[in-house]
Amino acid sequence: MDTKRVVSALCYFSIMFAGILFPLVAYFASEDLDVKHHAKKALFSHLIPLIPLPLILLAVYFDITRGAGEFPVMMFASAMLMVIMSFIVLIWNLVKGIKVLNIKDDF
């Protein structure tokens, strides 16, 4: 198996073990353009679940300043959005990693 394919696939699979760190290191350490391309795509896909994080922090702030008594709908909805996005990104990265490993033509 080609080393470039393995490193490119590991950039996608790193969502399970190294998150943002592995694609970032692979992007700066590799001189191959294909590995850089896959590392950049994997890095951006690893960052997608962090999009609702400001909403969660804002909801926590409003929940703390408003006081207890009401159900924190915005915080719950933002957290559920983050969980759903994380699951979708996990599946997408696994599929992309497998596709990179199964490329038949010259990488």
Image (cartoon, rainbow, N blue to C red):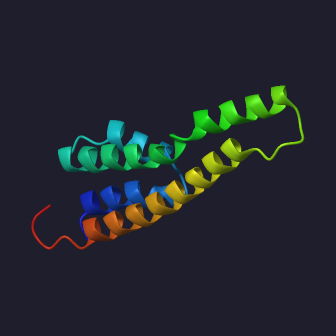
Side of 87 where 75 appears, left or right = right
Q: Considering only vertical position in the picture, is 91 above or below 67?
A: below
> Residue extending furthest left?
105
Residue 24 in percent (x, y) is at 41, 40
Quarter containing the C terminus: bottom left
Side of 58 where 63 appears, left or right = right
Residue 38 in percent (x, y) is at 28, 50
Side of 20 where 80 appears, left or right = right
Picture residue at 89% right of the left edge, 42% below the top? 69
Q: Considering only vertical position in the picture, is 58 above or below 69?
A: above
Q: Using the image as rendered, state which of residue 106 and residue 88 is in the foreground.
A: 88
> Residue extending furthest front?
70
Residue 96 in percent (x, y) is at 32, 64
Picture residue at 33% right of the left edge, 40% below the top? 27
Image quadrant where residue 10 sits: bottom left
Image quadrant where residue 91 sits: bottom left
Picture residue at 62% right of the left edge, 55% below the top? 80
Q: Considering only vertical position in the picture, is 82 above or below 51?
A: below
Side of 19 where 8 appears, left or right = left
Picture residue at 53% right of the left edge, 51% below the top? 18
